[in-house]
């Protein structure tokens, strides 16, 4: 059974940094796209960053230039370095692993989430 465990959330002040980690167990890490999404109460979960197995990264425009996603296949771990944090980055952050059905439709595994709170 695939299990994703996040860590690294916390309370910081505006302008500070945090690094989130997500370790995958029970499944395949290498070869799968990994991502980070966030959610605030009353809003839909939004993907903020993804990284393909070849290291190609894509970002939501709201975090472009401030967040960096990376992966260490030897450790089955993906990271989200968050710099220049703003109050609007406050959310529960979730790690995701992307799989695909033969049809091409996505299937996602999710972690349990870690709270990030940025005080202004």
Image (spheres, rainbow, N blue to C red):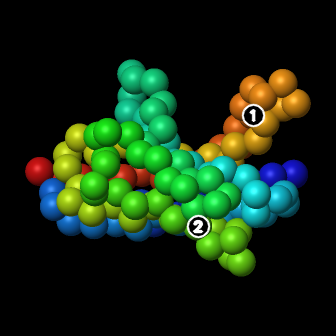
* Most distant residue in the left direction: 120
* Nearer to me, 68 or 3: 68
Instruction: For the residues labelled 1 and 2, say whether their Cβ atoms are less than 8 Å apart.
Output: no
Q: Position of residue 4 (x, y in %)?
A: 68, 55
Q: Can the viewer see residue 10? A: no
Percent coordinates x, y for residue 21 in the rendering: 53, 65
Among numbered discs 1 and 2, the one appearing first in the sequence: 2
**For the residue labelled by badge 2, is the local secondary structure a helix, a strand or a loop?**
strand
Q: CA distance from mark 1 to mark 2?
A: 20 Å
- Residue occupying image coordinates x 75% and y 34%: 107
The residue that label 2 is drawn on is 71
- Can you say whether 6 is above or below 38 in the image? below
The dot on residue 117 is none
Q: Is residue 32 left or right of residue 91?
A: right
Residue 27 in view (yes/no): yes
Q: Say which element carries label 1.
A: strand
Query: Residue 72, image x and y in percent?
Result: 62, 73
- Tell me the number on the disc at residue 107: 1
| Residue at the image position 51 percent from the left and 65 percent from the top | 70
How many neighbours does mark 1 have within 10 angstroms: few (below 14), some (14-19), or many (20 or more)?
A: few
Q: Residue at x 69, y 76 (%)?
A: 75
Task: Describe residue 62's horizontal placement relative to residue 8 as left or right.
Answer: left
């Amino acid at each position: 059974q695939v299990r994703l465990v996040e860590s690294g959330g916390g309370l910081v002040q505006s302008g500070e940094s945090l690094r989130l980690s997500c370790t995958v167990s029970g499944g395949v890490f290498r070869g799968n796209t990994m991502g980070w999404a966030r959610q605030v109460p009353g809003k839909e979960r939004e993907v903020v960053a993804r990284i393909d197995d070849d290291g190609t990264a894509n970002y939501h425009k709201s975090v472009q230039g401030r967040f960096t996603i990376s992966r260490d296949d030897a450790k089955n771990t993906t990271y989200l370095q968050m710099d220049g944090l703003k109050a609007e980055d406050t959310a529960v952050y979730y790690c995701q692993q992307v799989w695909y059905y033969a049809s091409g439709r996505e299937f996602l595994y999710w972690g349990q989430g870690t709270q990030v709170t940025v005080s202004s």
